[in-house]
Amino acid sequence: MNYSRLHLKIFNTLSHSSHNRRFSKQCSLAAAYVINGKQIAKEVQVELKAEIDQWKEEGNIVPHLTAVLVGNDPGSKLYVKNKMKAAKSVGITSAVIEKPHQTSQAELLDVVAMLNAEPSINAVLVQLPLPKHMNERTVCDAVHPDKDVDGFHMSNIGKLCLDVPNLIPATAFAVWELLKRSGIDTFGKNAVVCGRSKNIGMPVAALLHSDGDNGFKMGMDATVTTCHRYTPAKNLPEFTKNADIIIVAVGSPNLITADMVKEGATVIDVGINRIWDAKQERYRLVGDVDFEGVSKKASFITPVPGGVGPMTVAMLMKNTLQAAKIQTKKKREKTAIH
């Protein structure tokens, strides 16, 4: 669905519709809809709980998620806490294994191997970032692909690029879900992804350009341009000004400003930056987008916090159930053979 500015003004008056409740009620007629990631995440969790309840009624085991947390990073601890809370809310059992910062990579790999081998554990995630003495790629690839609910294993990334995904990277999955549930048309649209990280930017770009004609139900069929740290700053607006959809995942406050966005674009802000607010005399979280300025030109925009973050956690829960289904299917197939 492709909304005109007139349609947006009409929809803004429909404050009691289920569609409108997903977006911030603080938007004026001239402002973009603020995609309420918290609300949509709650909707996803309600649907997921019903699906998990049905899964258990059919005689299947309760899905289980184990997170591994290395070190004492406050942000990481909060993220893991939120994930465990979400798991409980949808009926997934969970556990956290905490290891000290000085844990060696070999010791961490032993923990991952133990979790891979335990049949009662369906989902494994190692919270990132890891201490600098560890190689994140080595650790991510140590998690079994069928238990890799973060979707970071090279096998899962490779399958995503071939439109035959196993477990989709949770943040890219969150972006997809927000676009689809917000009615954003992606077919043939110009999309710009700012950021090419292997965990976020690249998977987001892969989903956006994926081919829906080959049976991949998540195919978005957009025309995608990826910008990154070596894209000259003076040239970045040339790409973003022509974009119908802009996804930003760089980690640079206010990278995208109003003059870089065309009227009516959709802007999804994945960035999370902690900055000092002198007026409030405290740190606060902001994204990669100048929210105040860009929201006056865009049709849809996500806030930070409250946008992609809550949806990433919700998609992690969806991946946990999917992992349980994948493993159950393989066990039944193996039993049938024998």
Image: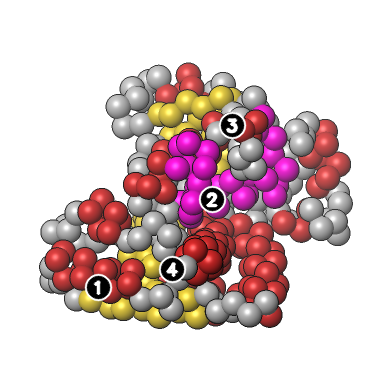
The Cα atoms of the two marked residues, 4 and 1, are separated by 14 Å
Q: Which residues are magenta?
A: 159-187
Label whose residue precedes the other's in the sequence (3 or 2) = 2
| Residue nearer the viewer, 39 or 11 | 39
Residue 236 in percent (x, y) is at: 42, 24
Label whose residue precedes the other's in the sequence (3 or 1) = 1
For disc 2, the marked residue is: 173
Checking the image for residue 15, the label placed there is none
Label whose residue precedes the other's in the sequence (4 or 2) = 4
Task: Give the residue drawn at x 78%, y 53%.
Answer: 20
CB contact under 8 Å: marks 3 and 2? no
**Residue 252 in view of the camera:** no
Q: What crowding class fits label 3: few (fewer than 14 Cα within 10 Å), some (14-19), or many (20 or more)? A: some
The Cα atoms of the two marked residues, 1 and 2, are separated by 27 Å
Task: Give the residue drawn at x 41%, y 63%.
Answer: 147
Label 3 residue SS: loop
Q: Nearer the viewer, mark 4 or mark 2?
A: 4
For disc 1, the marked residue is: 111
Checking the image for residue 123, the label placed there is 4
The Cα atoms of the two marked residues, 3 and 4, are separated by 28 Å
Label 2 residue SS: helix
For disc 3, the marked residue is: 211
The Cα atoms of the two marked residues, 3 and 2, are separated by 16 Å
> Residue 146 occupies which quadrant of the picture?
bottom left
Label whose residue precedes the other's in the sequence (1 or 2) = 1
Locate the N terminus and report the quarter of the image it occupies: top right
The Cα atoms of the two marked residues, 3 and 1, are separated by 38 Å
Task: Give the residue drawn at x 70%, y 35%.
Answer: 185
| Residue nearer the viewer, 298 or 109 | 109
Name of the residue lying farthest toward the front: 338
Residue 183 in percent (x, y) is at: 73, 43
Label 1 residue SS: helix
